[in-house]
């Protein structure tokens, strides 16, 4: 029997999607790649802004390196195959002048809302604990690399009870807008240098 006679299969026996399905798959892949690149650009923008704050003596905050384990020795170009050894932590950690810790995650979207579920359990647990101990913990959000917001952890944490859903629209994010001036995201403007009173009962996450 020839696979040419079997519906949905090509001559080698693999699935042969319709033109519409194939186009949809390509478009989905392209959107994923564009979103990944936009997310990386957002993180680079944050890093450049943090360098500006460092030069001003305001804070020293760095990108959290992802822990990896090499699977084979590097080649002549220094490249090597590796795998992640630990679930992702919040993207950035550091210290404000005066000693207060800063911990935050960066999330980009090209949609019309930012979802609570974009954070992993490990990131939620880490931000919750840092916030409980007095760190300035928040989520930096980018919409299409045009609009930027700094959402305090207690707002993000209680998203469902505050807004009735586990996402935030740009209208709901407006009170947390961050200005982008002369190539710098003013993401630390208004962050208190002194930690508030530590919560005795711990934080409660969205159910």
Image (cartoon, grey):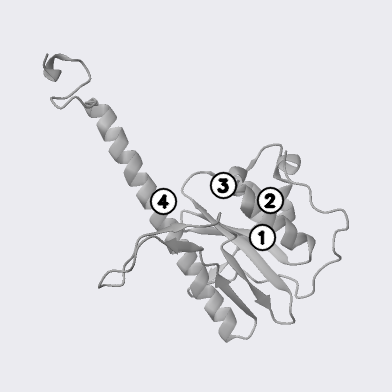
Give the mark nearer the N terminus: 1 vs 3.
Answer: 3
**Marks 4 and 2 in Cβ contact (< 8 Å):** no
Residue pointed to by mark 1 = 138
Give the distance between the C-alpha atoms of the residues marked 2 and 1, in whole angstroms. Answer: 8 Å
- In x, y percent, where is residue 200? 88, 58
Residue under label 4: 35
> 115 or 129: nearer the eye?
129
The location of residue 129, given as percent across then percent down, is 74, 58
The residue lying at 74 percent from left, 82 percent from top is 98
Q: Which is more N-terminal, label 2 or label 4? A: 4
Q: Earlier in the sequence, mark 4 or mark 1?
A: 4
Where does residue 102 sit, x and y in percent of width and height? 67, 69
Assess disc 4: are there few (<14), some (14-19) or many (≥20) residues with their C-alpha within 10 Å of its C-alpha.
some
Residue 81 shown left or right of residue 40 in the figure: left
Q: Nearer the viewer, mark 3 or mark 4?
A: 3
N-terminal label among 3 and 2: 3
Q: Earlier in the sequence, mark 2 or mark 1?
A: 1
């Amino acid at each position: 029997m020839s696979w040419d006679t079997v519906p949905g299969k090509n001559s080698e026996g693999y699935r042969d999607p319709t033109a519409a399905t194939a186009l949809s798959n390509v478009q989905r892949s392209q959107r994923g790649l564009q979103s990944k690149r936009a997310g990386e650009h957002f993180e680079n923008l944050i890093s450049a802004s943090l360098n500006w704050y460092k030069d001003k003596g305001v804070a020293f905050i760095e990108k959290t390196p992802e822990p990896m384990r090499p699977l084979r020795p590097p080649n002549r170009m220094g490249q090597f195959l590796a795998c992640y050894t630990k679930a992702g932590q919040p993207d950035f950690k550091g210290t404000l002048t005066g000693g207060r810790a800063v911990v935050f995650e960066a999330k980009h979207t090209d949609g019309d809302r930012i979802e609570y579920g974009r954070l992993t359990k490990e990131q939620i647990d880490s931000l919750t604990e840092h916030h409980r101990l007095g760190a300035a913990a928040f989520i930096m959000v980018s919409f299409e690399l045009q609009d930027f917001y700094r959402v305090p952890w207690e707002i993000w944490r209680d998203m469902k009870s505050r807004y009735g859903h586990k996402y935030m629209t740009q209208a709901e994010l407006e009170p947390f807008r961050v200005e982008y001036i002369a190539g710098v995201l003013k993401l630390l403007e208004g962050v208190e240098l002194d930690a508030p009173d530590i919560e005795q009962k711990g934080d409660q996450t969205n159910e």
